[in-house]
Amino acid sequence: MNNRQTGNVSEDFGKLILRASLALLILFHGVAKIMNGPDFITGLVAKAGMPPALGYLVYVGEVIAPLLVLFGLMTRPAALVIAGNMVVAVVLVHIPDLLSISKTGGWALELQGMFLAAALAVAFLGAGRYSVAGQSGRWN
């Protein structure tokens, strides 16, 4: 049997912690967009020369994909959507701070960097056994 089918409990619990942390923390941003509307994002998208309607994809990256990751459904592609969402956020909003250090000495984009790294880790690791879809399946 391969390790994917016989992974140990602590590895799968670690995957659950990573998935839940990433999903819940990104979901807060999505809930804020639901409550306040996407005007800020659609404005940035329009300013970048793209159709403002593309700004509504923020709901996919900050609501739908995190929920899929949290529950462990289509986990790998959903995590890649979150990663893509973070790249777009950096390009549209945070690019001036890309090489900046914060007042406390950390990278100015450490939160965005951590979200991106966690999303990529989930995409490579998969959901594990503590998920709705379980550890089997190509997309989980």
Image: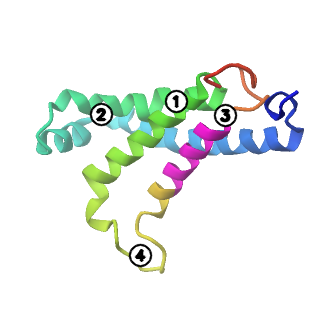
In front of the other: label 3 or label 1? 3
In front of the other: label 2 or label 4? 4
Which of the 4 quarters of the picture holds residue 74? top right
> Is disc 2 in contact with disc 4, using a CB cutoff of under 8 Å?
no
> Is disc 2 in contact with disc 3, using a CB cutoff of under 8 Å?
no
Tell me where the magenta segment starts and ends, as one range: 114-126
Q: How far, Cα to Cα, is label 2 from label 4?
A: 29 Å
Query: The residue tagged with tag 4: helix, strand or loop?
Result: loop
Residue 31 in sight in this render: no
Percent from the top left, x then y, of residue 57?
Answer: 33, 29
Kind of residue sitting beneath label 3: Gly
Mark closer to the chain start, 3 or 1? 1
Q: Which residue is mark 3?
A: 126
Query: The residue tagged with tag 2: helix, strand or loop?
Result: loop
Residue 86 in sight in this render: yes
Q: Which residue is mark 2?
A: 37
Residue at the image point whose x is 73% and y is 38% from the top: 16
Q: Which residue is mark 4?
A: 102
Residue at the image point whose x is 73% and y is 41% from the top: 15
Percent from the top left, x then y, of residue 4?
Answer: 79, 31
In front of the other: label 2 or label 3? 3
Percent from the top left, x then y, of residue 23?
Answer: 57, 38
Is residue 55 rendered to the left or right of residue 9? left
Q: How far, Cα to Cα, is label 4 from label 1?
A: 30 Å
| Quadrant into which the N terminus falls | top right
Residue at the image point whose x is 34% and y is 65% from the top: 98
Kind of residue sitting beneath label 2: Gly
